[in-house]
Amino acid sequence: MGEQPQGFGPELRRLRLAAGLTLTRFAASVHYSKSQISKIETGQKRATPEFARLCDAVLDSGGTLSALVPAVGAVPRSPGTAGSHVVWPPSSCTPGAGTSVEKGAIAAPGPTPSRRALMAAGAASLFGLRPGEQAPSVGDPTGDSLLEAHRGLFAQYRRIGQLSPPGALLPALSEQTHALHTLSERTGPHTGRALLALAARFAEFAGWMAQEAGDDATALRWTGHAVDLAHISGDDVLPSYTLVRRALIAYYRGDSAETIALVEDALSDRLPPRVRGLAWQRKAQGHALGGEYDACMRALDRARSLFARARAEEDATDDAPVLGTAHLDDPVSMITGWCLLDLGRPGQAADTLDRECAHIGSTALRTRARYGTRRALAHAMVGDLDHACALTGELLATGAPPGSATIAKDLRRLARVLGRYRDRPAYRAVAPALAAVLAPTRPV
């Protein structure tokens, strides 16, 4: 237990009394016991950011209490994801990299060049290429098929990412990124740029899988590699989108200010509406983390209007893979529920997440687990224990893909909230399965 934030307890007591709330009434409003709140007010127990946001919402104190609680630490590494499961991108790509690199100058990701060479040679051999020969260009029917095939492969990898442990997918993503980079050097300029742009998308996705595997440093390196590849290909959109990805890492560290600051350059009018919508959405999450309700809702409104524009425009674009989630029909409404929970409004969050989770496809297991966990957490925080436990049981029974550090963070929060009701039959029924999911495992 860390030191109680200076001034938090006295300020909580002052605001509670000013609102005319007894300890009993206030405890019922935030669903904490009187003894826990009393210990926090007297400095015997540390306040968490989650508790501070709940108090701000109930007392309508505009984030005053949240500002007195420091941000939590980084997301812990998930057991069993280190070592051979994580493939590192080139050491020359540092977090935040984005400088122009000459074509061919990027080192091959990962420690197994012979396998990569085989993959690259295999990709070229599909078109009967010998060393030094060029692959077909875009505009040639065979060149168009080449690009279409690799885009289809990217879509398949995203689907696999919904079903499998993230660390298990990283080697394949590393191989494919390298193969596309190699193949791009043996095509005409137009096709080469298109293949490099797709390689950047593979690298960006590898960064997300690394974050899911609990390794933020690797995630940032892969994201930097994606920026380098995008610059070479002439893609000026993906580098801005990677700011949204980096902001997600800051969000999971509990750093509201950095989450907001990182996306500022991704709000530019020169960017496509979808990228700007994703940036405003992430900014809303940062404001929610800081307890700033009005700023959060304004950011969500901006995101909603930009996503509407993006849907109208995307029908006229090419077949390039969509940026951001592809498994939510209405991402802004879902993130609204997410933000309401962070803002300490679990009742509103539960209503929103109940509605939106019903629209997630049955095969999007990782997405269902991510938002389903938040949904169960919202019901638990509002005191609806039986329903929260039922939702948790359903969630665990689906066999959601293991190894997600970000989902595990919310599962640990859920376990802590449910653990306040240890004597209730509903909790006892679900506790063993929840404990088994969160138990540390040893790498094989």
Image (cartoon, grey):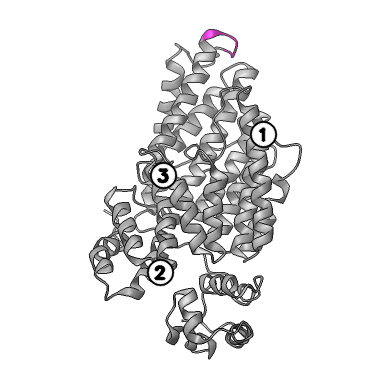
Q: Position of residue 320 (x, y in %)?
A: 57, 26
Nearest the eye: 125 or 56: 56
* In the rendered image, the vertical position of residue 9 relative to residue 233, given as above or below: below
Q: Residue furthest top?
A: 141
- In this figure, which residue is indicated by the disc labeled 3? 358
Q: State how far apart marks 3 and 1 are (Cα).
A: 25 Å
- The residue mark sitting in front, 3 or 1, is 3
Q: Position of residue 25 (x, y in %)?
A: 49, 81
Bounds of the magenta span?
A: 137-141
Q: How many angstroms separate mark 1 from mark 2 (CA)?
A: 39 Å
Q: What kind of element bears circle 2? A: loop
Q: Amino acid at mark 2?
A: Gly
Tell me which label, 1 or 2, sits earlier in the chain.
Answer: 1
Q: Please, what secondary structure does the residue beneath circle 1 have?
A: helix
Residue appearing at x 58%, y 28% in the figure: 196
Q: CA distance from mark 3 to mark 2?
A: 22 Å
- Label pair 3/1, CB-CB below 8 angstroms: no
Q: Is residue 226 left or right of residue 39?
A: right
Q: Is the residue marked by circle 1 packed among few (<14), some (14-19), or many (20+) residues within 10 Å?
A: some
Residue at point 72% right, 47% down? 265
Q: Which of marks 1 and 3 precedes in the sequence?
A: 1
Look at mark 2 in the image and give the residue it sits on.
383
Q: Could you say which quadrant of the image residue 367 lies in?
A: top left
- Which residue is the site of mark 1? 309
Does the image show residue 56? Answer: yes
Q: Amino acid at mark 1?
A: Arg
Is 87 on the left-hand or right-hand side of 395? Answer: right
Q: Position of residue 289 (x, y in %)?
A: 59, 63
